[in-house]
Amino acid sequence: MIVRVLGAAAVAAALGGCATVTRGTTNQITISSEPGGAEARSSLGHACTATPCTWEVSRKSEFVVSFSKEGYADLQVPVSTRIAGAGAAGFAGNILIGGVVGMGVDAATGSTLEHYPNPVLASLVPLKKAGPLGRGKHKAAIRREPAQRTEAEEAPQS
């Protein structure tokens, strides 16, 4: 019984300094567009019908956000991962407290990572609309007279 209690305490102490415990394995990603109200979908299956919105994503997942809005060109924004300052500190804490086990847990869960960019902001570009008929520059209509016929063309064919 005492061995189990000591073992549990040792595991708790080992995990106490690691980034998995201090930062978690997921990250909140804010999705926005200018103008707002665009539909957004991720390559991981997340979706929102109108920006802004927030998704919870695994820290180790890289993905692409696709934006669409009527009257605007579609846009894709890649979201990658990088080592976060706080994640690196938690990982370094493993040297003091968590040891190799804590480092392995952090590496496996991606808890030392953060998503970039976050927030994800898409600046949508309006599509060019064709002007209504009768507006804008016009080319002058060219009227061509029928070509003069030669005697050979006028002669009846036998």
Image: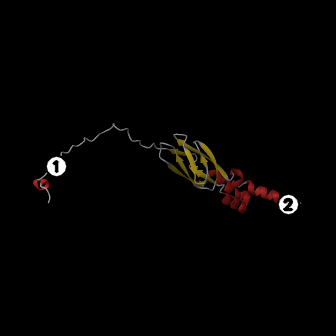
Q: Residue at (69%, 62%) from the top-left corner?
A: 104
Query: Tag 2 or tag 1, which sits nearer the N-term?
Result: 2
Q: Amino acid at mark 1?
A: Ala
Element at label 1: loop
Quadrant of image for the N terminus: bottom right
Q: Which residue is mark 2?
A: 4
Q: Position of residue 120 (x, y in %)?
A: 56, 47
Left of 101 or right of it: where is 70? Answer: left
Q: Residue at (60%, 48%) from the top-left corner?
A: 47
Q: Are marks 1 and 2 in contact (CB under 8 Å)?
A: no
Left of 108 or right of it: where is 13? Answer: right
Q: Amino acid at mark 2?
A: Arg
Q: Position of residue 11 (x, y in %)?
A: 78, 58
Image height of 34 relative to 106, above or below: above
Question: Looking at the image, which is closer to me, 117 or 147?
Answer: 147
Q: Disc count in the image?
A: 2
Q: Classify 10 Å Cα crowding around label 1: few (below 14), some (14-19), many (20 and above).
A: few
Q: Residue at (69%, 60%) from the top-left corner?
A: 103
Q: Residue at (10%, 54%) from the top-left corner?
A: 151
Question: Looking at the image, which is closer to me, 61 or 138?
Answer: 138
**Which quadrant of the structure image shows residue 142?**
top left
Left of 28 or right of it: where is 14? Answer: right
Q: Which residue is mark 1?
A: 147
CA separation in Å, label 1 and label 2: 108 Å
